[in-house]
Image: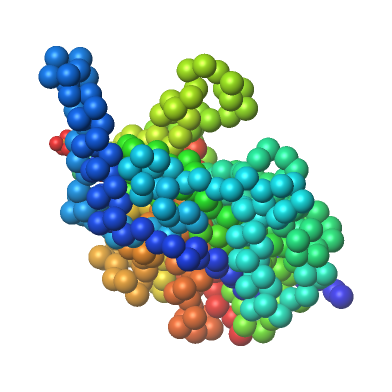
Amino acid sequence: MKTTGRPVISATGLFTPAESITNEELVAAFNAYVDKHNAEHADAIAAGAIVPLEHSSVEFIEKASGIKARYVLNKAPIIDPDVMEPRHRERSNDELSLMAEIGVAACQQALERAGRDPADVDAVLCAASNMQRPYPAMAIEIQQALGIEGFGFDMNVACSSATFGIQTAADYIRAGNARSVLVVSPEITSGHLNWRDRDSHFIFGDVATAVLVEDVAIAPAEHWDIVGTKLKTVFSNNIRNNFGFLNRAHPESHGSDDKLFVQEGRKVFKEVVPMVAQMIVDESERLGIEPTTLRRLWLHQANTGMNRLIAHRVLGHEANEDESPTVLDTYANTSSAGSIIAFHRHSQDLVPGDTGLICSFGAGYSAGTVFVRKAG
Ligand code: COA
C-alpha cells in the first residue's frame, strides 16, 4: 500500500490495575510505621541522637497534589507497615514478565480499537521510566507476545517517555521506515517509590498505556492527525534515582534512599512550570496555532497546581476540567502514562477539526508536546 509520510494517532489503550489504595489507607499505614519506628528508637530520640519521624496527612496530600488514590499491582505489602513496598512473585524466564503483561494488555486494547491486525504493525517502542530488566528489551518481549514482526526497543525519558516515543514513532512514519508503530508505556512506579518517605510516599501509581501511531494511509477513518511534535531536555538533579547496575552490590546501597525516586519538589515546581508553558506557547506559534484556541490540554499528571498554572499561561484564563482534564485524583502520578490516560479517557467528545495538546514533563528535565487534531 502507498504511504503518505503523515503520522496520526489511530487509537490508544489503557490497562488499569484491579487494586487501588486510598489516601486514608496509605496514611494509616505510613503513620503506623512512623509510630513503630519512633517507639523502637525512643531512647535515641530522647537522647537527641535521631529525630523522630512525623505523621503524614490525608489533607496535606490532597491539597499539595490533588491525589486521592492510586492504582497498584500489589496492594497488601505496600500498606503493611512492616513491609511498605511491593513484593512480586519472581517469574520464570518462560513466563511473560509482569511489565510485559500489563503492556500487552494496553496494546491489545489499542489494536482492537484501531481494528489493526498485529501482523501489520512494524515496530514496538517500550517507553517508560523504569524497565524491569536491562535486556532483552521489554519491547521485544511485548512484540513477541503480540505476534508482531519487525523490531522493538526500549527507551527511557522518565515522565516524558511516552511523548518522546510518539515523536520517535512519528519520525519513522515521516521517513517512510514504518507504517504502524506501537508506543507502550507500562509504568510500575510503585517499584521506584520510597513508601517510607513522607515527602513523596503519596505521589505515584501503576498503569500501562499504549498509543498506535500510523501512516494516515492505513489509519482508521476516525483518528488524530499529529500536527506537530517537539521535545526538550535540560539536565537537572532535582528529580533523581541512583539505582543502577554499577551500585547493585555496593555495601552502602542496601536500603539507601537515593536508589529510589528522590525529588526537590518545590524546585521542580518552580523550574518546570515556566519552562513547559513557554515551550507550549513557542511551539503553538511555530505551528500557526493560537494557544487560546486549543480545545483541550491533556497535561502530564504530576500535580494539580502545576497543571493549573501551565494551563492558565497557555489558555489565558483559569482552565476548567473540560479544558484541562485531570486523572490525578484516581490514578495519581503515573509518570509518562499520565497525559496518555487523560487523552484516552477524555477525547471521545471532541469533534473533527478540534485541536488539542498532549504534553509531558518531568525528570531530566524532559518535556514533550504532541499537538493533535481530530479527523474523521
Ligand atoms: N504530610 C503532611 N505534611 C507534609 C507531608 C505529608 N506527607 N510531606 C511534607 N509535609 C509538610 C512539610 O514538612 C512542610 O512543612 P513545613 O512547611 O512546616 O516545613 C510542608 O508540608 C511543605 O512541604 P513541601 O515538600 O515543600 O510541600 P509542597 O507544598 O512543595 O508539596 C509536592 C510537595 C511534591 C506535592 C510539590 O512540591 C510538587 O508537586 N512538586 C512538583 C514535582 C512533582 O510532582 N514531581 C513528580 C515527578 S514529575
Q: In x, y percent, where is residue 250? A: 55, 18
Q: In x, y percent, where is residue 203? A: 36, 49
- Determine the residue positioned at 53% across, 83% down: 352
Task: Determine whether, in the image, residue 168 is placed left or right of residue 288.
Answer: right
Front residue of this view, candidates 211 and 262 = 262
Front residue of this view, candidates 253 and 67 = 253
Task: Determine whether, in the image, residue 91 is placed left or right of residue 1.
Answer: left
Q: In x, y percent, where is residue 373? A: 54, 73
Q: Quadrant of residue 5?
A: bottom right
Q: Report the residue that reaches farthest toward the right.
A: 1
Task: Determine whether, in the image, residue 69 is placed left or right of residue 48.
Answer: right
- Determine the residue positioned at 40% across, 61% down: 20
- Determine the residue positioned at 43% across, 54% down: 75
Task: Determine whether, in the image, residue 175 is placed left or right of residue 71.
Answer: right
Q: Quadrant of residue 245?
A: top right
Q: Quadrant of the C terminus?
A: bottom right
Q: Quadrant of the N terminus?
A: bottom right
Give the answer, above or below, for where 109 lies relative to 76: below
- Determine the residue positioned at 68% across, 38% down: 134
Front residue of this view, candidates 69 and 227 = 69
Q: In x, y percent, where is residue 334? A: 46, 54
